[in-house]
Amino acid sequence: MDNDFPIVNERVTAYINSLAPDNSREIENIREKAEKEYVPIIKRETESLLKTLITLKSPRNILEIGAAVGYSALIMSGCMGVDSNITTIESFGKRVKEANENFAALGMQDRIRLIDGDALEVLDILDDSFDMVFIDAAKGQYGEFFNKAIKLCLPGAVILTDNVLQEGTIVESRYLIEQRDRTVHSRMRDFLYDITHRDDVSTSIIPIGDGVALSIVR
Ligand code: SAH
Ligand code: MG
């Protein structure tokens, strides 16, 4: 799904990103490799929001759905406290392997637990409780991820969901959306309606990056 006009003016985004302090060389190498191989890692402006939220919340136990090569998990691990841990889920074998290598290379293998499997199944068998969740996997399954993840959340937990505005195409009529993208488009709209109207969370949709939903569990 491509759109002619980005959610946020590109020059404004470029300016905001120019203000972001550099990550370590190791982290930047992982980003560069991922971008070269079209792995859909978080945008820089979203990364900065994620870091600030972790600092605000000081979560002890973070759940991530969609690890890819481990980039966002490593970003989160870089600003979480010494007693904090991350559980992240990835179903694509090649990425599981690369993520584990990246966690080990940065000495984070004991702080980040990567579960190899389909999050829809893994979430049913996890018995941990989490105070922060980052949802960043298959866009058509967000409703299910959210419903399963919230059952594992403590009151006050922060749930950040990425890519909810679909490069801005979320505002288009379904008839202007290519046939193959229509299911995801309508599911994402249903998802956004649900999380902004249900009683168990307070949600704000933020037009940053590809759009994020910030939900706080009541
Ligand atoms: N959070 C990562 C990017 C994740 S990209 C970062 O910013 O660095 C989305 C990933 O979710 C892909 O690697 C894809 O394989 C994985 N994914 C999609 N659906 C999934 C599912 N149901 N269970 C587990 N992983 C899934
Ligand atoms: Mg994303």
Image (cartoon, grey):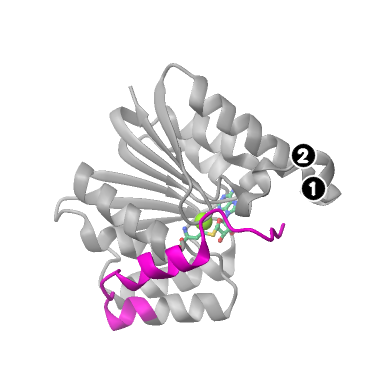
Q: Which mark is residue 151?
A: none
Above or below residue 212? Residue 209 is below
Q: Position of residue 212 (x, y in %)?
A: 47, 46
In the shown orientation, is residue 144 left or right of residue 148? right
Q: Amino acid at mark 1?
A: Ile
| Residue displayed at 42% across by 77% down | 30
- The residue nearer to you, when weighing 71 against 109, is 71
In the shown orientation, is residue 17 left or right of residue 205? left
Image region (quadrant) for ligand 1: bottom right
Q: Which residue is mark 2?
A: 173
Report helix, strand or loop for mark 2: loop
Above or below residue 107? Residue 164 is above
- Pointers 1 and 2 in contact (C-beta within 8 Å): yes
- The residue nearer to you, when weighing 15 against 184, is 15
- The residue nearer to you, when weighing 65 against 126, is 65
Mark 1 CB within 8 Å of ligand 2: no
* Residue range highlighted in magenta: 1-28
